[in-house]
């Protein structure tokens, strides 16, 4: 491909500049106005803050006291010092970016509403705080004037963060909120107050900070980084001289050992949060709550110390304690909002004896084989019942025990495991059911039990597989297109890939999850955490530049009998399917087809594309029991696309094996419906369910 010539590149750059200028007229006009005012006022080379014009044009509480109500508008175009013009013009780039992406009217609305709100809200707050005559900072700041467009620029920046894709949206908000809070604590100027009010306004109005929508992994990571940032800021406040709202501090004015102990404790807690330890979340909540309550008490006590004859400095550095409390409040709100990420599933033992471990379940699976879904029984969050002939995997939700897939153990003993599981559940006063069970389990449950089809397991037989004939046209087209675009297929394991590839997979997954109304589904759908198992294989589609355009994860299917007596993988089950936005179009067809060829050449017998949950097409004569599954499927279709996924898998000409929900009778359905919803969406909030339009239990019309 011929490289573009210099004139061609110049024309392209000129075109980009013309488009940018044509789409940002308000920003250009604002920047020109600031520069013109700087020339006229001589603020470009002389400190405007020292000029007589400061009294006439600057905004602030003194200006409002004297009736200069025009100053919030006029003061926006002045800058206090010549050197401040550089950061000011850079900050106005946020207005330009917002105007480029959302239009002139929207950008101007954010800028001016943020600017005016910041000015008036800070003035209103200071008019109240100056009533505390003993509060030196409040008296000084209440008598200070200010100029500049920083509040409006930060409002535009906050709006831009709301446009960012997940997970960068949440990360951006956390950084911005931390920055404006620290600025108030360390510097405590009028401008800092105006900035934080503008940011908080956009936070409340736009409501784009929704940490509950992030993946569980991302929620834990932000909590981890937030705790580290919290202790880092505390160290900064202890080491750096400040002059904020609660007085001035000198370096090392507080207790060195107190700060050192805090660092060690918070680092331990942060590590526990990263590992999803419930105790770490509880301790973090307690610690943050103590800091907040202590700060509130000191803040209320500080203005009255002289009148009461108290010396609060005897109990520590007051300024540092109050500043830490403000940061703790931010962290406390976040930890409470994502509490589901640290809600450890309570271990529940049915029957007598010791509960089997994950290692025992994995060993039995390798020894006796299992179904296409059996590897999911080794995932975190499951409990196990030991029976006389094997192991049953289950989850306990809302008074219901949901057995996942077929029991583990020798095929001839699975019916006995089914019977013992039902007896143990009913003996414990719980509702038993089996989810995604096969025909063997259906035949083993009591005759009075009901069955409901929940999915069709889509199985591709690999021996002799060839993409020939008309039915394979779409698959061949995808393979040929991948060849023309120099796409590379790699079948690997996540742990074997370099950091750069793993980071791309994380980014693709976070992007896929972040913009959905509901969090990642679990139970029979894995995440990257499950894909990190050394026995799980990853299929990558990589473009010529080394960018991952999509990936799949494949779970092993162990054979029930092996001639050598050694565990043998007879096939692979599809779990994760993720693609990069704007990447290679038919990347999923390419990945599945390439994986099928690789597995076939290795001697595998089958490849399961899994059953799209809740996507079965029921015949007209089906029982009314299908209403629950059908309505849940319809409600989740706009969010997760189960039915469209089911149609996509049909391209690979699979044969189907039915998977069932097995239960005692219709009276158990309401509780089973709630339990299944919680199993699939353990971290979703009631508001998220309502927003997605879910109705768990409704009668037929």
Image: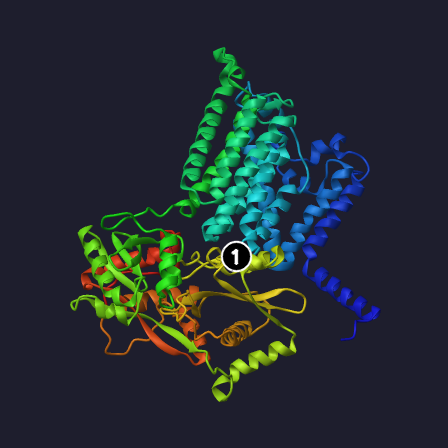
Q: Residue 197 location, x and y as percent?
A: 56, 39
Q: Nearer the viewer, residue 165 or 71?
A: 165
Number of labelled discs? 1
Specify the farthest residue to the top: 309
Query: Which quarter of the image is occupied by the C terminus?
Result: bottom left
In the image, what residue occupies the spot 56% across and 79% down? 478
Quadrant of the image occupied by residue 488: bottom right
547 sits to left or right of 524: right
The structure residue drawn at horizontal position 40% and vertical position 52%, both measured from the top left corner, is 683
Q: In the rendered image, which residue does mark 1 sit on?
A: 510
Residue 143 visible in the shown view: no
Q: Where residue 523 sits in the image (x, y, percent)? A: 37, 58
For residue 84, say whether it is visible.
yes
- Could you tell me residue 208's position as x and y percent? 51, 51
Q: Residues within 10 Å of mark 1 (few under 14, many from 20)?
A: many
Q: Quadrant of the N terminus?
A: bottom right
- For residue 548, which quarter of the picture? bottom right
Q: Residue at x 24, y 75 (%)?
A: 622
Query: Percent from the top left, x then y, of residue 443?
Result: 22, 70
- Quarter residue 558 falls in: bottom left
């Amino acid at each position: 491909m011929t490289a573009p010539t210099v004139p061609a590149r110049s024309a392209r750059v000129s075109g980009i500049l013309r488009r940018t200028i044509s789409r940002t007229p308000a920003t250009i006009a604002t920047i020109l106005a600031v520069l013109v005012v700087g020339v006229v006022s001589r603020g470009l080379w002389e400190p405007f803050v020292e000029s007589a014009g400061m009294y006439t044009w600057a905004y602030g509480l003194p200006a409002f006291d004297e009736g200069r109500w025009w100053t919030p508008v006029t003061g926006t175009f002045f800058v206090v010092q010549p050197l401040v013009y550089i950061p000011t013009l850079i900050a106005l780039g946020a207005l330009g970016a917002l105007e480029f992406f959302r239009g002139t009217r929207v950008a101007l609305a954010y800028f001016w509403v943020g600017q005016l709100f910041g000015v008036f809200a800070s003035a209103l707050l200071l008019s109240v705080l100056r009533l505390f005559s003993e509060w030196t900072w409040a008296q000084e700041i209440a008598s200070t004037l200010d100029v500049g467009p920083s509040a409006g620029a930060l409002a535009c920046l906050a709006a831009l963060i709301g446009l960012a894709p997940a997970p960068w949206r949440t990360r951006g908000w956390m950084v911005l909120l931390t920055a404006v809070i620290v600025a108030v604590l360390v510097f405590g100027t009028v401008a800092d107050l105006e900035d934080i009010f503008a940011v908080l306004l956009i936070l409340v109005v736009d409501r784009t900070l929704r940490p509950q929508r992030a993946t569980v992994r991302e929620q834990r990571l932000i909590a981890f980084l937030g705790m580290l940032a919290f202790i880092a800021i505390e160290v900064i406040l202890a080491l750096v001289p400040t002059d904020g709202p609660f007085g001035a501090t000198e370096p090392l004015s507080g207790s060195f050992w107190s700060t050192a102990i805090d660092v060690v404790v918070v680092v331990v807690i942060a590590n526990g949060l990263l590992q999803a330890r419930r105790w770490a979340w509880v301790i973090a909540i307690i610690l943050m709550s103590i800091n907040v309550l202590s700060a509130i008490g000191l803040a209320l006590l500080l203005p009255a110390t002289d009148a009461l004859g108290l010396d609060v400095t005897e109990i520590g550095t007051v300024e540092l304690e109050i500043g830490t409390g403000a940061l703790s409040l931010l962290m406390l709100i976040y930890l409470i909002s994502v509490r589901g990420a640290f809600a450890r599933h309570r271990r529940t033992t049915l029957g007598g004896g010791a509960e089997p471990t994950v290692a025992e379940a994995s060993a039995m699976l390798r020894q006796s084989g299992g179904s296409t879904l059996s590897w999911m029984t080794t995932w975190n969050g499951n409990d196990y019942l030991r029976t006389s002939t094997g192991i049953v995997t289950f989850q306990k939700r809302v008074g219901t025990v949901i057995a996942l897939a077929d029991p583990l153990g020798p095929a001839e003993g699975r019916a006995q495991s089914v019977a013992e599981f039902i007896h143990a559940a009913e003996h414990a006063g719980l509702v038993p059911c089996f989810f995604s069970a096969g025909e063997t389990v259906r035949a083993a449950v009591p005759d009075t039990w009901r069955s409901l089809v929940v999915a069709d397991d889509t199985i591709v037989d690999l021996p002799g597989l060839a993409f020939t004939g008309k039915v394979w046209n779409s698959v061949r087209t995808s393979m040929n297109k991948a060849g023309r675009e120099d796409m590379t297929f790699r079948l690997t394991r996540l742990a074997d890939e370099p950091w750069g590839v793993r980071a791309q997979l994380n980014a693709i997954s976070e992007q896929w999850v972040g913009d959905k109304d509901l969090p990642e589904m679990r139970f029979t759908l894995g995440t990257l955490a499950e894909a990190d198992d050394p026995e799980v294989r990853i299929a990558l589609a990589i473009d010529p530049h080394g960018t991952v355009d999509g990936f799949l994860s494949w779970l092993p299917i162990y054979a029930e009998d092996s001639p050598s007596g050694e565990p043998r993988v007879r096939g692979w089950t599809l779990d994760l399917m993720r693609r990069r936005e704007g990447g290679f179009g038919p990347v999923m067809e390419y990945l599945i087809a390439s994986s099928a060829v690789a597995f076939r050449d290795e001697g595998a017998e089958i490849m399961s594309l899994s059953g799209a949950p809740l996507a079965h097409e029921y015949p007209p004569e089906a029982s009314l029991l299908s209403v629950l599954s059908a309505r849940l499927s319809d409600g989740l279709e706009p969010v997760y696309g189960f039915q469209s996924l089911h149609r996509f898998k049909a391209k690979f000409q699979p044969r189907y094996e039915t998977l069932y929900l097995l239960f005692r009778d219709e009276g158990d359905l309401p509780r089973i419906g709630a339990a299944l919803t919680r199993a699939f969406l353990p971290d979703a909030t009631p508001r998220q369910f309502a927003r997605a339009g879910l109705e768990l239990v409704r009668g037929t019309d």
